[in-house]
Image: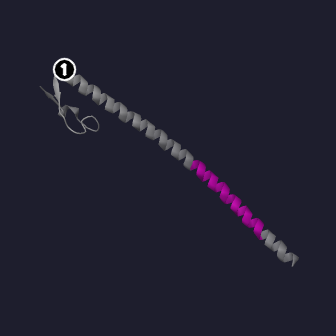
Amino acid sequence: MLSNILEHHGHANQHLASLEEDLVHSKREEEKLKATIEALEKKKREMNARVALMERNDLYKLLEAKMEGFQIANHPGTIGGFKNLNLLITRK
């Protein structure tokens, strides 16, 4: 009977050690995922800043063209996402 109790205690200790290893592994994985998420969020902020700068540059080009006497086409999406502003600017 004592040997059964000791054997059961040994199995319980092995199971506990296995659970502790799993916990350590899970914490490492969690840290890796947090670092990945932070890197992706930083990249997203950088990309958003680039897009905002490109859109602002497009606005300056349109304003400059308008001031120089060009007519700006009234087209949906004129400000954001148009690849070639020259297609939107025509001489009055």
Q: Find disc 1 in the rendering and name its residue.
A: 68
User: Which image quarter is the C terminus in?
Assistant: top left
User: Which image quarter is the N terminus in?
Assistant: bottom right
* Identity of the residue drawn at 69% across and 59% down: 21
Q: Residue 12 placed where, x, y %?
A: 76, 68
Whether residue 32 is situated above or below residue 76 in the rendered picture:
below
Question: Residue farthest to the bottom?
Answer: 1
Label 1 element class:
loop
Question: Residue farthest to the top?
Answer: 68
* Identity of the residue drawn at 79% across and 73% down: 8
* Identity of the residue drawn at 44% across and 40% down: 44
Q: Residue 71 placed where, x, y %?
A: 16, 27
Q: Does the magenta stretch mainly form a helix, a strand or a loop?
A: helix
The color scheme shown is: one colour
Please tell me whether residue 65 belongs to the stretch shown in magenta.
Answer: no
* Identity of the residue drawn at 84% across and 74% down: 5
Please tell me whether residue 15 belongs to the stretch shown in magenta.
Answer: yes
In the rendered structure, which segment of residues is drawn in magenta? 11-32
Q: Residue 27 placed where, x, y %?
A: 63, 52
Q: Amino acid at mark 1?
A: Glu
